[in-house]
Amino acid sequence: MRSLRIVAALLLAICASLALAQDARTSEAQAAARDWIALVDKKAYQDSWRTAGTKFQANITAERWAQAVQRVREPLGPVVQRSGARTKFTHQFRGAPDGDYALVLFHTSFERKPEGQETVTLEHERDGKWRVIGYSIQ
């Protein structure tokens, strides 16, 4: 019984250290991506535009964004499952000035596209918040 408790304590310690292994920066970027993409899931396209980053808003109007995302996203049907957030950070992004960027990739299953991938591109803006500046589905 004592050895079982020791094993349980070791497993708990390992799990706790793995949870801490993901740094706060990764957690923040992923949370911002998930919060934003939840708006798209709910078809709250105007809200997704309003909460996006300045680069996003400068490149597309709210109306054109709503039209574009409806045209691409709605035919796929609702999200069945979204998992496997993987985050990559970079300071250089093609077509943009040097900055603090994150790409968050999700494996997403839609009702009519069982094997998809969504990429949410974020910028760490001057106010210290991660905001979406790009979104794509493959």
Image (cartoon, rainbow, N blue to C red):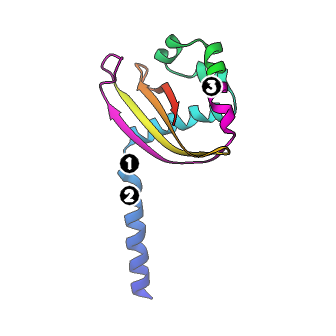
User: Label 3, label 2: how many angstroms apart (C-alpha)?
Assistant: 36 Å
Judge from the rendering whether residue 89 lies leftward or rightward of residue 47; answer left or right.
left
Residue named by callout 1? 22
Amino acid at pointer 1: Gln
Dot 3 or dot 2: first in sequence order is: 2
Name which residue lies at 45% across and 88% down: 1
Secondary element at tag 1: loop
Q: CA distance from mark 1 to mark 2?
A: 7 Å
Q: Secondary structure at mark 2?
A: helix
Give how far across and how far down residue 51 sits, in percent. 57, 22
- For the residue marked with disc 3, what is the amino acid? Val
Identify residue for label 2.
Answer: 18
> Residue 111 in magenta?
no
Q: Quadrant of residue 60?
A: top right
Q: Hey, which quadrant is residue 87 in on the image?
A: top left
Question: Which contiguous range is marked in magenta?
Answer: 70-99
According to the picture, the residue beneath numbered tag 3 turns out to be: 69
Q: Nearer the viewer, residue 50 or 82?
A: 82
The vertical placement of 91 against 111, above or below, is above
